[in-house]
Amino acid sequence: MKRRTILEASLALPFVSPAKAAEPWRRVRPSDAAWPSADEWARLGEAVNGHLVKLAAPFASCTDKGCEDLLAQMKNPFFVGDQPALTQTSGWLDAWASQPSAYAVAAESAAEVAAAVRFAQEKRLRLVVRGGGHSYLGTSDAPDSLLIWTRHMNKVELHEGFVPQGCKSAPQAAVSVQAGAMWSDAYDAVTTKAGRYVQGGGCTTVGVAGLVQSGGFGSFSKRYGTAAAGLLEAEVVTADGEIRIANACQHPELFWALKGGGGGSLGVVTRLTLRTHELPENFGAVFGAIQASTDEDYRALIAQMIKFYAEALFNPHWGEQIKLEGEKVLGLSLVFQGLNKVEAESVWAPFVEWLKARPQYKILSPIQALALPARQFWNAEFMQKYLPPGVMVSDPRPGAPKHHAAWGGDLEQVGWFIHAYHSAWMPSSLLEPKRQQELVDALIECKRQWDVALHFNKGLAGAPAEAIEAARDTATHPQVLDAFALAICAGGGAPAYPGMPGQAPDMARAYRRAAAVKQGFEALMKAAPDAGAYVSESDYFLRDWQRAYWGNNYPRLLAAKKKYDPEGLFFVHHGVGSEGWSADGFTRKA
């Protein structure tokens, strides 16, 4: 055919536009036509036995008197946790702000959770899962979403001889805890009443399910390992709306992924069963604060503290933290188990003698040890009777359970607005004599910019072999096994919930503080340049979060995610599989 004939023939054809790129798949918002109708929401309400709640921002709707009453409760973590429209952290600079979901299912059973999951899947809704609401990274809420709120699922049941479903293992002592229970609920049942120990979190108002799924460290993890490693079985609602039992014998990959793979990414855990341990005779604590007069003296003090820790405290007896803070101050806030008061004082005697021989150090608070029966460690009535006021603070609301009490030191975090937060697993090699000076240099250089703490219980180096091996069979970053501590460099300000009356945050100050925290942490990382981070306490803006949180465990986690949630129903910021979604979790990336 001649060229002219071809041209004439082509002109005769109807015009066909280039193929349009397919619109990215996205979840629906209230402004979309596909958003569920009032009748559809009503049907969901019926399916969950009337436990559907329409949410609104608390400070946007309160009257003057109502706002005063609300503000008066804002330092009570139990009150905050009881509000489905509030979170325990009010936001993060340039990252997120506490904003309620559109609706919440205040679930009271796994069946109600399953109904909510099926509805979200069918209606293409953004789904959020919350128990304790303590997420620093803002995963406890999201605007325009459906919240599955498990707060009312808080039953605790003890077992003398538990065998996971479908397994033939030997019976062992355990406790089953529903997803909405806090650690105050678990410790009251297991320790105060039954005289046993379950490895959980240090903060009593943290949710059991969230902490276990994030790996989970408590004050005595140096002896008993991680909370995730203690998981024997989980009841979980997966993205298809099915209620499954996951353990080492049934759905083993899902079970493994739940042990440290992060909450809210793989399903909705509705019940967990954790092993319990014999309780030691005593739990105790050591407190103190020392101030140096010069920079040189401060460096020598920190060097002596690191040397002392490596020689005397680097073992299963000791946990919690030291902090480089204030004006050349070393703060001590440690706990111990398996020792009495005299034994603990004997351990610290060489350090105390070293200080006495050096008058250049000012003792702001004497180094003191206290010990108490381990069974009473979370007994609020006992603690308030025998310890100074403010050590443990009860929920003051009329009718509150007596065991609902929080450590006084944790109350400063209620509602706080985070400016910056960084963490790093510090390898045990830094405690070797030839590397201790390197660690001290990094700590001092960090302190020039910002305070820094070493959390010795968040790191399993020095723990018993069985605790390390149990944690090895979890999804948590393998660096945890060889970390002697988690270093934390962080800062924040007063609560800043949207619409909250009162003085607005000083944003210029917040930016200055965030920059100082970042600079300090970068200096610290010179001693551990490849260190990963703890998913529950880390930087919102981490770029290599897959490696930092899970290391070489991430591909296996992602495979479990694709098997049990192939469409990505469950989304959290920097959660498994979240790289496939927009930052708000609404739009799937091409």
Image (cartoon, rainbow, N blue to C red):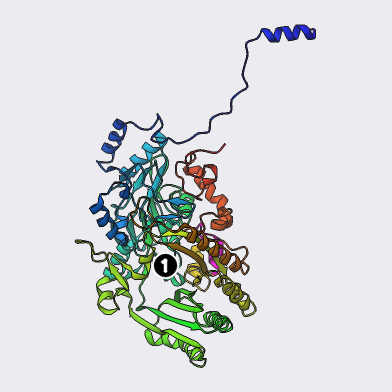
| Quadrant (top left/top right/bottom left/bottom right) for the C terminus | top right
Secondary structure category for the residue under label 1: loop
How many labels, in total? 1
Query: Measuring 72% from the left and 7% from the top, which residue is drawn there?
Result: 8
State the image quarter where residue 404 is shown: bottom left
Judge by depth and name the residue closer to the eye, 450 or 191.
450
Q: Position of residue 7 (x, y in %)?
A: 74, 10
Q: Position of residue 27 (x, y in %)?
A: 45, 36
202 relative position to 519: left or right: left
State the image quarter where residue 395 is shown: bottom left
Q: Position of residue 150 (x, y in %)?
A: 32, 50
Residue 475 lies in the magenta-colored region: yes
Query: Measuring 60% from the left and 68% from the top, which residue is drawn there?
Result: 523
Judge by depth and name the residue closer to the eye, 529 or 90.
90
Amino acid type for the residue under numbered disc 1: Gly
405 relative position to 13: left or right: left
Image: magenta residue range: 473-483
User: How many other residues sit within 10 Å of disc 1, few (<14), some (14-19) or many (≥20)?
Assistant: many
| Quadrant (top left/top right/bottom left/bottom right) for the N terminus | top right
Q: Is residue 472 visible?
A: no
Residue farthest right in this picture: 2
Q: Position of residue 28 (x, y in %)?
A: 42, 35
Judge by depth and name the residue closer to the eye, 39 or 502.
502
Q: Is residue 489 visible?
A: yes
Report the residue marked by disc 1. 218
Residue farthest left in this picture: 399
Residue 35 lies in the magenta-colored region: no
Query: Measuring 51% from the left and 51% from the top, which residue is drawn there?
Result: 574
| Relative height, residue 144 to residue 259 (above, below) | above
Judge by depth and name the residue closer to the eye, 39 or 224.
39
